[in-house]
Image (cartoon, grey):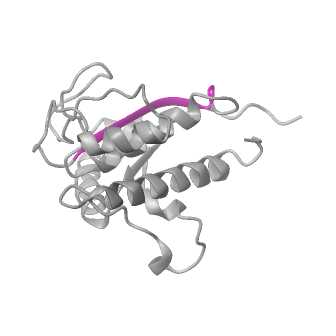
């Protein structure tokens, strides 16, 4: 009989924390709120690398895309990744470098976000446990780096960009859970 896996914590990061990272968080929360993953995820959160929308709700197009796909109970206030402040799940304060030792996985939506996170992670003084990576590494395409997908920022585009982000975040979430918990049947 297999032992119970340890719960993991996940942080999603984009630029403004109102489109991509909030969509990923909403999707991921919906998936892991159901068996068999409910007890396997300890914390799910999201933040941004820029301070453009701190305290704001997710973009209305993010919320409508989630709602159109059955996710209607998601609530969030945007926050910014910062090397100077600590946050709690109930606040909208920016994060601290301590998040690199708090979260198991920190997922960037694109390569610019990843570079920003890697720079911030260097300030953790080698105490980081988080695996910082592109969420698109779970695109489901094994092999060359070119097959790693970025989640394009849909902010300045139309509804189709939000639909594409929804599809990607759903696929990446499912693939991540299958990879981290291979013995769990969904």
- In this view, 146 is above or below 165: below
Question: Residue 186 is drawn in which quadrant?
Answer: top right
Q: Classify residue 18 as left or right of residue 166.
A: left
**Left or right: 127 in relation to 141:** left
> Viewer-proximal residue, 34 or 125?
34
Residue displayed at 32% across by 50% down: 20
Residue 68 in the image, given as x and y percentages of width and height:
44, 41
Residue 127 can be seen, yes or no = no
Of 180 and 100, nearer the camera is 180
Q: Residue at x 29, y 18 (%)?
A: 90
Q: Which residues are magenta?
A: 38-48
Residue under the point 58% across and 71% down: 141
Q: Quadrant of residue 23?
A: top left
In percent of width and height, residue 170 lies at: 51, 50
Q: In the rendered view, would you say 55 is above or below 111?
A: above
Residue 166: where, in percent of width, then height? 43, 52
Residue farthest toward the left in the current orientation of the protein: 52
**Residue at the farthest top position:** 90
Instruction: Determine the image quadrant of residue 98.
Output: top left
- 177 vs 73, left or right, is right
User: Dominant secondary structure of the magenta stretch?
Assistant: strand
Residue 87 part of the magenta-drawn span: no
The image quadrant where one finds the N terminus is top right
Judge whether 172 appears above or below 91 on screen: below
Q: Is residue 47 magenta?
A: yes
Residue 93 visible to an observer of this rendering = yes
């Amino acid at each position: 009989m297999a032992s119970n896996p340890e719960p993991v914590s996940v942080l999603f990061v984009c630029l403004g924390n109102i489109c991509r990272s909030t969509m990923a968080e909403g999707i991921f929360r919906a998936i892991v709120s159901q068996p068999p993953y409910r007890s396997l995820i300890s914390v799910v959160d999201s933040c941004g690398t820029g301070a453009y929308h701190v305290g704001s709700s997710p973009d209305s197009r993010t919320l409508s895309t989630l709602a159109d796909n059955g996710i209607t109970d998601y609530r969030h206030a945007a926050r910014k990744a910062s090397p100077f402040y600590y946050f709690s799940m109930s606040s909208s304060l920016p994060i601290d470098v301590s998040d690199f030792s708090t979260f198991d996985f920190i997922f960037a939506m694109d390569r610019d976000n990843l570079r920003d996170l890697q720079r911030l992670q260097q300030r953790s003084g080698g105490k980081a446990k988080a695996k910082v990576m592109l969420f698109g590494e779970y695109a489901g395409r094994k092999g060359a780096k070119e097959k790693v997908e970025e989640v394009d920022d849909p902010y300045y585009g139309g509804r189709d960009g939000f639909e594409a982000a929804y599809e990607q975040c759903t696929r990446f979430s499912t693939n991540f859970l299958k990879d981290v918990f291979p013995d769990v049947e969904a």
